Image (cartoon, grey):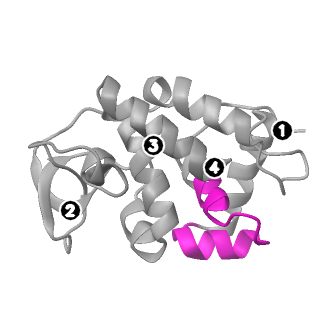
Amino acid sequence: MKEHRGMRPQDIVVLLKISSKGNKQWLIKDIAADLGISQSEVSESLHRSAQAGLISESKRMLMKNALIDFLIYGLKYVYPQHPGPVIRGIPTAHSAPPLNKEIVSKEVYVWPYAEGKARGQRIEPLHKSVPLASLKDKKLYELLALADALRVGKARERNIAIEELVKRIK
């Protein structure tokens, strides 16, 4: 068995993509294609996640409670993010669905994306493929935006994001 050398940001993206599938069957090649990353990268990600207890040893079942706990208590410490300069991109965190329906803010956060229609402060996505992958999958987009709210949000935003994540992942 390979030694666990820590989680990587794309591991969270892969796990959230699997979560967005609900109870539908999935294959590594499909996850890779949907996320725009290689099959070997997805396979390695699943291996790390299994060792961390975020997916079953068979790599077929999410450990939903463990994933939620990691997102709530670990994400902002392991993959911290601070808003950067104003750029063009795709809204994230409280600026994106579902939080943008509940939170009104003058601050707009975006992932960098040249063809994006929004302007706001730059938030570095967990993986470079996130902006494009989120345009293909609304459920994944919402999960990633909620995860970013945990990374950069204030207490109120974080609390609402936690409620929404639990609803969507459980």
Q: Earlier in the sequence, mark 3 or mark 2?
A: 2
Q: Which residue is mark 1?
A: 2
Magenta residues, as a range?
14-37
Q: CA distance from mark 3 to mark 1?
A: 28 Å
Q: Earlier in the sequence, mark 3 or mark 1?
A: 1
Q: Which residue is mark 2?
A: 89
Q: CA distance from mark 4 to mark 2?
A: 26 Å
Q: Amino acid at mark 1?
A: Lys
Q: Earlier in the sequence, mark 2 or mark 1?
A: 1
Q: Which residue is mark 3?
A: 147
Q: Amino acid at mark 2?
A: Gly
Residue 99 seen: yes
What type of secondary structure mainly makes up the magenta span? Answer: helix
Left or right of 34: which side holds 145? left
Q: Which of label 1 and label 4 is nearer to you? A: 4
Marks 4 and 2 close (CB-CB < 8 Å): no
Q: Residue at x 80, y 36 (%)?
A: 51
Q: Which residue is mark 4?
A: 169
Q: Which of label 3 and label 2 is nearer to you? A: 3
**Secondary structure state at the residue bearing disc 1:** loop
Q: Which of label 4 and label 2 is nearer to you? A: 4
Q: Position of residue 151 (x, y in %)?
A: 38, 33
Pick whichever, 20 or 55, lies toward us: 20
Q: Amino acid at mark 3?
A: Ala
Q: CA distance from mark 3 to mark 4?
A: 12 Å
Q: Amino acid at mark 4?
A: Ile
Q: Which of label 3 and label 1 is nearer to you? A: 3
Q: Residue at x 40, y 37 (%)?
A: 160
Left or right of 3: which side holds 78? left
**Secondary structure state at the residue bearing disc 3:** helix
Q: Residue at x 45, y 76 (%)?
A: 136
